Structure formats: structure tokens, C-alpha cells
């Protein structure tokens, strides 16, 4: 008997990326949600994305065995969903044959749709994948050192008690511009990267080359950030998604001025601004207003890329604010934390509200 339309939810993971890996997939009846089939398998030492594709393939094979005519495929891997939908190109040599096999299987059905879902909505397949990974670890395989984009749920730092896989944000500051050379306030103005800035962007990009665990590149709308993001996106084979909320603070009338010039122009206001996050520069934006904006950005990114690793290319204040949110720190962090041009920081936000910071102001790639 034909199963008609079915829903396939699939997942895969690797504890080490590459490391002990496995996949899980479950097939549901589209009409009443009954479980029609489950598949899980330990894969030995492979990467996250290989495991994810293997879960996808196993799900399509199970749907074919059930005689399904149409498949609604749901995964929490943005990369696999976008590649299978034809919107992102498959460049990594390990992915090409897997994507080809999945496409061959998909052609057996009258229709296949691909939908990204948050990790929390993929709990059944995620559980099966973790059971498979438990088996892979039990086999005695030794994982390699973890990569930046390790998809497997990392151990919570310190004494934190967190649940679920975090959204890992690789926070990259843009490269040098003519305003940053003289340490001038650079907010909503749009200077391009200098030659040094372009070299810094390429240096940062080289850090991500071959890292197929990054699901998306998200950038501020300002040109200097988009130039920096484009260099990384090129080596990753990903598009740049612009998020308006990631723009820099509006410094208003202080735009383009040095610290001393702004202090001489508005001495009392500048002194107050340096200690009170509710104070606005003339015609500008306060740090409290930036925080409200960045909270919305964090919530938007964790909802869109829940459980994934994303590269976020932006500016000093948005990065400091995301780190402040992850640390649950007070406003003094904004004034005391230094971030170099093209530096990398890493913050993680868990679905249960927990968060952590794993890296701050790393410039080893420059």
C-alpha cells in the first residue's frame, strides 16, 4: 500500500567535526503524524555535514520503501536544505556525491519539498542521531580536535546547566577604513576598506576556508562589513545575508571626529556619554538603544539558525553588545573591552536562555 505523502525529519551530527558521528531520521504520515519508520546509524569518524546528508539519504530511502509519492523533508541544517533546494552551490568534495545521491532518490517521488526547522522542532531525529553518535563513541574511535563550527552540542562551560544545542555566533569585526586609521568615530558613515582592510578581510577569510560547518554568513548593511563578509563568504561558498539590525551605532554629529575633537565640541555631554549608556551623541543613538536593537537581532538569529554555527560580520558596538548579553555583564563592558579590526570573538546562545563566551578579540589569522 502506498504511503502517499509523508513527512521526513532527518538530522546528523559529529562530536569533533570530524569525530564520532551518526544520523537519525524518522518518517511520519502526513495526515495524522503516525511514525511510519525510523532509521539511525553510527558512521565512524566523519564531519557534521556528511552525517546530515547521510540522514537525509536514509530518510528518502525509507520513504521510497514505504511507497510514498511525495515527501516533505524537514531538517535543522540550513546548509543541506539550501543546497538541496538549489539555492546554494555544493562545493565541498565530500558533499558532492552525497548531494548527487540525494537528488537521485528525490527524483523517484512526484514531489519533494525541503524546509528548514529549528533544532527544537527536530527533536525526534536529533534523539536518534545522538543515540547513533553514542554508539560511534562506544566503538573506541578517537575524535580529532574540534573545529570552530562543531555542530555537536558542546559541553557547557564552567558550572552552567544548559539544555539543547546553542546557536554559535562567530563575531567578526570588519577590516580597516580611513576613519579607523585615525581612530575616528565611524557609525552610519560608509567608508570602504583600505588596502590594509582588504588584506585583513582576506586573512580572516582564510581562517574559515574548508570549514563546512558554518551554515550562514550574516552581515551589517554597511559597506565595510559587507566587504569583509564577502571575502569569507567566497571561501565558504555561501551567500551574504544582510541584517539591518547589525548596523553600527549612530554617532550623529560626532561621526568622523576623533575622541578629542568630540570632547572639545561637546565637553559635558561627551563626559556623560562615556559613563551613561542612556545618553545620546548629538542627533545620534544611545548604547541603550543599540542594546534594544541587538537583543532583537540575537533573538532573530537564534530563531532562524537555531543550533547552527553562523558567521556574523559587524562592528564594535554590536559585537560588544552580543558579548555583553552572552556574559550577562553590566554596561561597563562596553567601555572597557577592546576589539581589534578584523578580530574574531565567539558567543553561544542556548535555547533554554543560557549563554557563554568562548573567544574574545582573536587576531591570530592576521
Image (cartoon, rainbow, N blue to C red):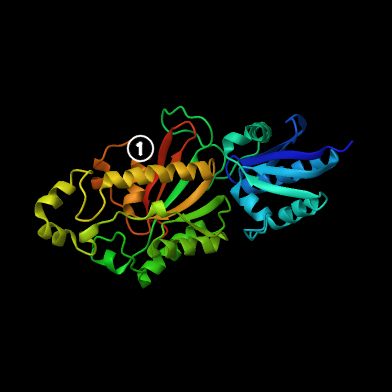
Q: Residue 112 appears at what percent x and percent y?
A: 74, 48
Instruction: Using the rendered image of the protein, determine whether residue 148 is visible from the camera's viewpoint.
Output: no
Point out the image quarter for the C terminus: bottom left
Instruction: Using the rendered image of the protein, determine whether residue 275 is visible from the camera's viewpoint.
Output: yes
Point out the image quarter for the N terminus: top right
Q: Residue 321 appears at what percent x and percent y?
A: 33, 45
- Position of 278 relative to 364 (above/below): above
Q: Nearer the viewer, residue 94 or 174?
A: 174
**In the image, farthest residue toward the right:** 1
User: Label 1, on which residue?
Assistant: 327
How busy is the neighbourhood of tag 1: few (under 14 within 10 Å), some, or many (20 plus)? some
Give the side of residue 129 with respect to residue 247, left or right: right
Residue at the (30%, 37%) spot, across then down? 329
Residue at the (33%, 68%) spot, across then down? 191
Give the side of residue 324 with respect to residue 5, left or right: left
**Residue at disc 1, secondary structure:** helix
Q: Residue 143 appears at what percent x and percent y?
A: 60, 41
Amino acid at each position: 500500500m502506498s504511503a502517499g505523502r509523508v513527512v521526513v525529519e532527518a538530522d546528523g551530527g559529529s562530536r569533533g567535526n570530524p569525530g564520532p558521528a551518526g544520523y537519525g531520521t524518522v518518517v511520519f504520515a502526513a495526515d495524522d503524524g503516525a511514525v511510519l519508520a525510523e532509521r539511525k546509524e553510527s558512521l565512524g569518524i566523519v564531519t557534521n555535514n556528511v552525517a546530515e546528508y547521510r540522514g537525509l539519504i536514509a530518510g528518502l530511502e525509507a520513504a521510497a520503501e514505504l511507497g510514498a509519492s511525495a515527501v516533505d523533508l524537514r531538517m535543522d541544517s540550513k546548509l543541506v536544505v539550501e543546497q538541496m533546494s538549489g539555492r546554494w552551490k555544493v562545493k565541498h568534495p565530500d558533499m558532492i556525491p552525497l548531494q548527487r545521491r540525494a537528488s537521485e532518490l528525490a527524483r523517484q517521488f512526484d514531489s519533494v519539498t525541503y524546509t528548514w526547522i529549528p533544532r527544537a522542532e527536530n527533536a525526534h531525529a536529533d534523539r536518534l542521531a545522538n543515540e547513533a553518535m553514542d554508539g560511534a563513541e562506544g566503538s573506541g574511535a578517537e575524535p580529532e580536535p574540534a573545529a570552530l563550527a562543531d555542530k555537536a552540542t558542546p559541553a557547557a562551560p564552567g558550572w552552567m546547566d544548559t539544555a539543547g544545542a546553542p546557536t554559535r555566533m562567530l563575531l567578526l569585526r570588519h577590516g580597516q577604513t580611513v576613519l579607523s586609521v585615525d581612530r575616528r568615530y565611524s557609525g552610519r558613515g560608509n567608508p570602504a576598506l583600505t588596502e590594509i582592510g582588504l588584506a585583513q578581510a582576506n586573512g580572516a577569510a582564510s581562517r574559515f576556508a574548508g570549514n563546512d560547518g558554518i551554515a550562514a554568513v550574516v552581515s551589517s548593511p554597511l559597506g565595510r562589513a559587507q566587504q569583509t563578509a564577502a571575502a569569507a563568504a567566497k571561501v565558504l561558498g555561501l551567500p551574504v545575508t544582510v541584517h539591518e539590525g547589525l548596523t553600527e551605532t549612530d554617532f550623529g554629529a560626532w561621526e568622523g571626529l576623533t575622541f578629542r575633537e568630540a570632547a572639545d565640541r561637546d565637553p559635558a555631554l561627551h563626559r556623560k556619554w562615556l559613563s551613561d549608556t542612556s545618553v545620546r551623541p548629538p542627533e545620534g543613538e544611545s548604547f541603550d538603544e543599540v542594546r534594544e536593537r541587538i537583543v532583537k537581532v540575537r533573538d532573530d538569529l537564534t530563531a532562524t539558525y537555531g543550533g547552527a554555527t553562523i558567521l556574523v560580520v559587524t562592528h564594535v558596538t554590536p559585537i560588544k553588545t552580543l558579548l555583553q548579553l552572552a556574559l550577562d555583564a553590566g554596561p561597563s563592558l562596553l567601555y572597557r573591552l577592546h576589539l581589534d579590526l578584523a578580530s574574531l570573538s565567539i558567543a553561544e546562545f542556548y535555547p533554554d536562555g543560557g549563554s557563554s563566551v568562548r573567544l574574545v578579540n582573536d587576531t591570530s589569522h592576521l
